[in-house]
Image (cartoon, rainbow, N blue to C red):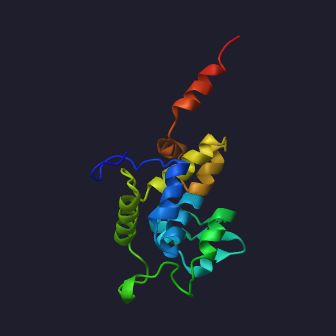
Amino acid sequence: MKVAGNGQGKILTPEELKLLFVKGFVSSRDRALFGICLYTGCRVSEALALQTSDIKGGTLTFRKSTTKGKLKTRVVDIQPGLAQLLAEYPTSPGALFPGMRGRSLALTRFMADKILKAACGRVGLEGVSTHSFRRTALTMMSSAGIPLRVIQEISGHNDLGTLQRYLEVSPEQKRIAVAVIGF
């Protein structure tokens, strides 16, 4: 868990996610931004770099030029939960999350962090960072038995070792794993 800017962002439970999206985030923009981070497993900087033209045909395209390693473009399907959040968020051509009062073309990471901190304060969550949504998404996929190679393709990780550092193993998963041993 992240404490005073140190450590990894907390993995959120379904209850904590519901609390944040229902009571923490106060605007459709904020729900859409962090919904993209959750439902696609992307970094907040990748979500902030999206253009409205990157949403097409039920997919979201993270352009090579806006990804961390700038190695390849990723296309992720928009699942129904994300589709609903996007439908509630009015957009106009250009940046999907435009900056404040024309100061920048896109909302900044600093502002996204402030939005998240305020939302967490409203619902009493600690240890949450913008990266928590990425870690939560990847851990949920892993817990559901999605092969690591598929998760790697969605998340854009170049290395499986790096991806595995994102994934949290629950006590229940360890109990189940040990329970299969025997003869």
Where's the N terminus, which quadrant? top left
Q: Is residue 2 left or right of residue 18?
A: left
Residue 103 screen position, x and y as percent:
35, 86
Let me know if residue 158 appears in the view: no
Residue 72 screen position, x and y as percent:
57, 64
Of residues 41 and 89, the one nearer the viewer is 89
Q: Quadrant of residue 124?
A: bottom left
Of residues 28 and 75, the one nearer the viewer is 28
Of residues 110 and 85, the one nearer the viewer is 85
Let me know if residue 65 appears in the view: yes
Q: Quadrant of residue 155?
A: bottom right
Residue 75 screen position, x and y as percent:
64, 65
Q: Is residue 4 left or right of residue 28?
A: left
Residue at 63 percent across and 76 percent down: it is: 87
Q: Is residue 143 left or right of residue 98?
A: right
Which residue of the protein is positioned furthest toward the top in this rendering?
183
Q: Number of callouts in the render?
A: 0
Where's the C terminus, which quadrant? top right
Residue at 46 percent across and 67 percent down: it is: 25
Residue 142 screen position, x and y as percent:
60, 43
Which residue of the protein is positioned furthest toward the left in this rendering?
4
Q: Is residue 103 left or right of residue 83?
A: left
Residue at 52 percent across and 30 percent down: it is: 171
Residue at 48 percent across and 74 percent down: it is: 27
